[in-house]
Amino acid sequence: MESNTSQLPVPSFIWDSLMATMKAQSRRLVDDIAKTLGQEPGPLWKEVSKQQFGVYLVDMNEPTNEVFQCQSYCVCGQVERPCKKPVVFGKKYCSEHLQKPQIRPTITLQKLRLIKYYDEETGDVKLVYLNPATNEVFSTETLDLVGEWNHQEKTLALFETSLN
């Protein structure tokens, strides 16, 4: 795997807080395990704290970091989309899909892209689906045809009926 040289500066008080929280949670876990086994937590904590690991911070919005995203699919309303939740390094699926991943169907489905646009009348940012093959625009709630995308001019034309 290629090493990424970009760095994420983290204020020291946030890093110290994170490390203290992780240590406290680890201590709580060791205490629970020792209690369950009917043992003293001291020797177990000593054994557990021998091995130290580094932490890797990954920008999940970086497209090249797809290997850290769940490769399963989930259904959201009427749309099937990639899960994209973070995964443990070396795994292909998140904890939710680890036991029963939803692999993409073999049938060819219409592929839609989610796009944002600014509604000048309401002043809101809204979402619609775009079919890049046909330049048709669909509602995210109902998948009804609500407009057209002009690829050359990069403009979105919504039908009057979709503004209700």
Image: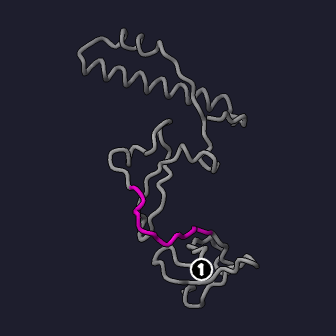
Query: What kind of colouring is applied to the model shown?
Result: one colour
User: Can you say whether 61 is above or below 31 in the image?
Assistant: below
Q: Secondary structure at mark 1?
A: loop
Q: Which stretch appears magenta?
A: 103-115
Relative placement, left or right, of 98 versus 12 is left
Q: Tell me which residue sits at (47%, 74%) in the image.
A: 141
Q: Among all residues in the image, which is located at the extreme right?
A: 153
Residue 109 or 160: which is nearer the viewer?
Answer: 109
User: Can you say whether 35 is above or below 91 in the image?
Assistant: above
Residue 55 or 130: which is nearer the viewer?
Answer: 130
Relative placement, left or right, of 137 versus 32 is right
Relative placement, left or right, of 83 versus 122 is left
Q: Among all residues in the image, which is located at the extreme bottom?
A: 160
User: Quadrant of the rendered structure where residue 117 is?
Assistant: bottom right
- Badge 1 local density, few (<14 within 10 Å), some, or many (20+)? few
Quadrant, the N terminus: top right
Q: Tell me which residue sits at (52%, 69%) in the image.
A: 111
User: Quadrant of the rendered structure where residue 33 is?
Assistant: top left
Residue 105 coordinates in the image, percent (x, y): 40, 62
Relative placement, left or right, of 157 versus 144 is right
How many labels were placed on the picture? 1
Which residue matches tag 1? 134
Residue 148 in magenta stretch: no
Residue 74 coordinates in the image, percent (x, y): 41, 59
Residue 44 coordinates in the image, percent (x, y): 36, 13
Residue 105 in magenta stretch: yes
Q: Identify residue type, mark 1.
A: Thr
User: Quadrant of the rendered structure where residue 164 is?
Assistant: bottom right
